[in-house]
Image: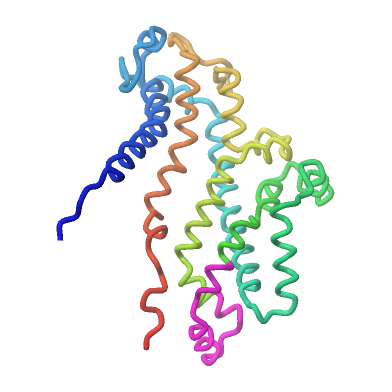
Amino acid sequence: MKQRFSWFDLINLIIMSGVVVLCLYPFIYMLAVSFSGSGPISQGEVWLFPKEFNLDMYKYVFQDGRIMSGYKNTIIYVTLGTATALLVTSLGAYSLSKRNMIFNKTFMVMVVFTMFFGGGMIPTFLVVKELGLVNTMWAIILPGAVSTWNLLIMVTFFRGIPAELEESGKLDGLSEMGILFRIVLPLSMPVMATIGLYYAVGLWNGFLGPLLYLRDQELYPLQLHLRSIVLSGELTSSEGPIGGEFVIVETALKYAAIMVSTLPILLVYPFIQKYFVKGALIGSVKG
């Protein structure tokens, strides 16, 4: 049967194409400017493609010691923070997914309550300070170890796993922890990958937390160094100001720094995209 192409499809295609252009063009423009020479940039000739292609701005970015230090710290925060968050969230979600657990509804109400009411910035800072976490990497990792929204998503997913699988695990002598790590989590890769990406992106883009809790610049993540670069418009290396015979274009320098800090987290998505559209439970229960 021949499928018809309706006016709704056409209008929808036009609108979505416009949204895609609006979302992609600023990114493409920053990329073009960061690869362009000072002349075309100052004259406003760069729109879509680089002119007088060069890598000078990226050389300046990577010559600055703060960028590499920020990368190292951010990778540590993202790796440890995502692993910790997934572990804590999965343990909490598995417990709350058991409807026969004592005080299950009470705990669920307490969890949902935090979505609407929170202590705020100052009480949270005081708690982190009293725990002795200020100016340590754990001040970035532990306060955001559990997201209520992500927890509820995982609870819903765990409740959809057939009870027959867990019962078969109990017959084989598995404990609750064994069922979680050997049966439930392997079948939950789609939700684990999705929520893991949410946590990773949040940690990668984290700005307010490091700004509040970190004092030592050696602990600064990439976003705080990027803030300094964007505000100042210039980079300094460990030996002092750099630039020499090159003309540093402030706008291009900022865009290059933004691209360096943005591209890595964007490149992660294609590797876990399949988990967003693929179900893991198909065929898990026979008969």
Magenta residue span: 155-180
Quadrant location of the C terminus in the rendered image: bottom left
Quick one: 188 or 23, which is closer to the camera?
23
Q: Residue at x 84, y 49 (%)?
A: 130
Quadrant location of the N terminus in the rendered image: bottom left
Image x and y of residue 223, in percent: 58, 34
- In the image, residue 4 sits, relative to residue 174, either above or below, namely above
**64 relative position to 89: left or right:** left
Quick one: 212 or 79, which is closer to the camera?
212
> Which picture quadrant has residue 65?
top right
174 drawn magenta? yes
Q: Residue at x 37, y 74 (%)?
A: 282
- In the image, residue 100 sits, relative to residue 115, either above or below, namely below
- Chief secondary structure of the magenta portion: helix
**260 relative position to 146: left or right:** left
- In the image, residue 260 sits, relative to residue 115, either above or below, namely above
